[in-house]
Amino acid sequence: MAPRVLIVEDEQDLASVMSYNLRADGFETARVDTVAGARHELGARRYDLVILDLMLPDGSGLDVCRWIRAQGPLRDLPVLIASARSEEVDRIVGLELGADDYLVKPFAVRELVLRVRSILRRTEPPPMREDQIEFGVLRVDRGAHRVFVEEQEVHLTALEFRLLTTLLERRNRTQSRDMLLVDVWQLSARLDSRTVDTHVKRLREKLGAAASYIRTVRGIGYRFVGTPDEPESN
Ligand code: CA
């Protein structure tokens, strides 16, 4: 899902340019031009980041920032202040109020986009462990260590389960036999890579209708397909 950015800016030309460039970079944007508009929009929809002008027709962007930080559900919403006011005091107050970054106008729009990206990277929560993975006819419940194919439970050994989830997590990326020995078997030495083949064969047999998701990459290892309906061309 594209990150959603709310632009709070009363200079319409600048707002358009920011919006255009953010969209070109894969963001979704919405624009408001007042303090009241910002509050209304933030109360009504989910955003991933706010770009905040300070001098707005009905008040200060700092008030919006203060208001955001006082709202339970919005408290952690990243805020980038973009203001023509370059006084150090504004910068300090803005950052004290919890703004994540401060950009002084005029700025290159490219710089703005980079800052937005960097804030989102910084504030992004660590990737959630997917406990329930559904992939075509396959469903893996990692918490419960259970696997279902076409809603029928398939009983895997602990090792087969680890092999399956490792391939699934790294789907669409070829895993060499050596890599799998290290990561699944926790063997650091190149013992016997045919061990991997034997287990993949057994795993495929158990997976039945989902067996074709695990492709052999000749001379290298295995690859879990990127999408359940990927044609069998290789
Ligand atoms: Ca303004």
Image (spheres, rainbow, N blue to C red):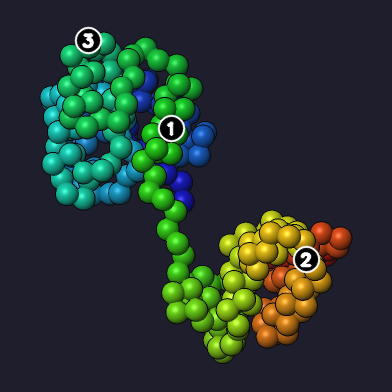
Residue drawn at point x = 26 percent, y = 43 percent: 76
Task: Tell me, yes or no, if residue 228 can be seen here.
Answer: no
SS at mark 3 in the image: loop
Residue drawn at point x = 69 percent, y = 80 percent: 203
| 33 sits to left or right of 28 | left
Q: Disc 3 versus disc 2: distance between alpha carbons? A: 65 Å
Check disc 3: other Cα within 10 Å, few if <14, some if 14-19, many if 20+.
few
The mark that comes first in sequence, 3 or 2, is: 3
Residue drawn at point x = 45 percent, y = 34 percent: 117
Task: Tell me, yes or no, if residue 142 can be seen here.
Answer: yes
Above or below, comparing residue 162 to residue 72 in the picture? below
Amino acid type at mark 1: Ser
SS at mark 2 in the image: loop
| 75 sits to left or right of 3 | left
For mark 2, what is the residue?
191
Above or below, comparing residue 45 to residue 227 in the picture? above
For mark 1, what is the residue?
118
